[in-house]
Image (cartoon, grey):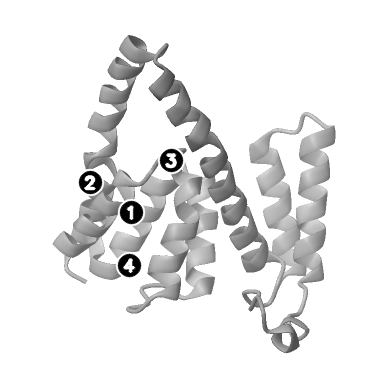
Amino acid sequence: MNPFVIFLLFVKYSALCFGGGYVLIPLLNADLVGAPPKLLTPELFARYISIAQVTPGPVFINVATFVGYLQSGFFGALGATLGAVVLSAPLVVLAIKLLRKYESSVWVKGFFRGMRPASFGLILAAAWIFFEMSVLSSKVPWGDFAKIAEIKINWAGLGIFAGAFILLSKTKISLTMLLIIAAAIGAVLCR
C-alpha cells in the first residue's frame, strides 16, 4: 500500500479518536482485519496489539507504526505515524483551550456526558475483541448457534486472563511484572 494512502487512513482514525487509543480497536479491527482489502490477519492484528501495549508510547501510535511498516516499510511507518498525530495533536491543544474557556457551558457538559458512555462502550468492545483473540479459537458468529458451538476455548489463555485479572485487582503488582509473568506462562503453556 502506498505510504500516502496509509497516511490518509490513519488521519481518518486520528479524527475519530475520542476517548483514547483503545476506543479505536473495534474500528481498526473492522477496517484492517475484517474488511477488504484485509491488511492484517486476525493473528497478526492480535500480535500488533499485544506488542503495542508493552512498547513505550500510546497504543494507537504504536499500532499505526507497525501497520505502516508492514504495508510499506520505513516510509509506510512514517506516514502512518504522522497520520496518527497530525490531527490529534492540534485538536488536543484546541480542546484544552476551549475546555478552559467553556467548561461551565451546558453544551460542553452534555458533550462529555454523551462521550463517556460511548467511549466506555467502545472500550468494552475492544475488551471483547481481545477476549476473542486470546481466549477463543475464532470470532463469535452471533446468530449462528451451530458455529458458536464449534468455537474452542484456549484454557491456558483463559487461565492467564483470570490470573492477571485477580492479581491486578487484589494486589499491587506492577503492570510490567504482570506482563512479564503472563508472557513467560504463555511461552510455556500456549505453544
Mark 3: secondary structure: loop
Q: Residue at x 81, y 69 (%)?
A: 155
**N-terminal label among 2 and 1:** 1
Label 1 crowding class (10 Å Cα cut-off): few <14, some 14-19, many 20+?
many
Mark 4: secondary structure: helix
The residue that label 2 is drawn on is: 82
Amino acid type, label 1: Thr
Point out residue 42 in the picture as x, y percentages from the top left corner. Answer: 51, 73
Which circle, 4 or 3, is nearer the viewer?
3
**N-terminal label among 2 and 4:** 4
Point out residue 119 in the picture as x, y percentages from the top left corner. Answer: 52, 42
- Tell me the number on the disc at residue 70: 4
Quadrant of the drawing holding the N terminus: bottom left
Which circle, 2 or 4, is nearer the viewer?
2
Q: How many marks on residues?
A: 4
**N-terminal label among 3 and 2:** 3
Name the residue furthest bottom: 146
The residue that label 1 is drawn on is: 65
**N-terminal label among 4 and 3:** 3
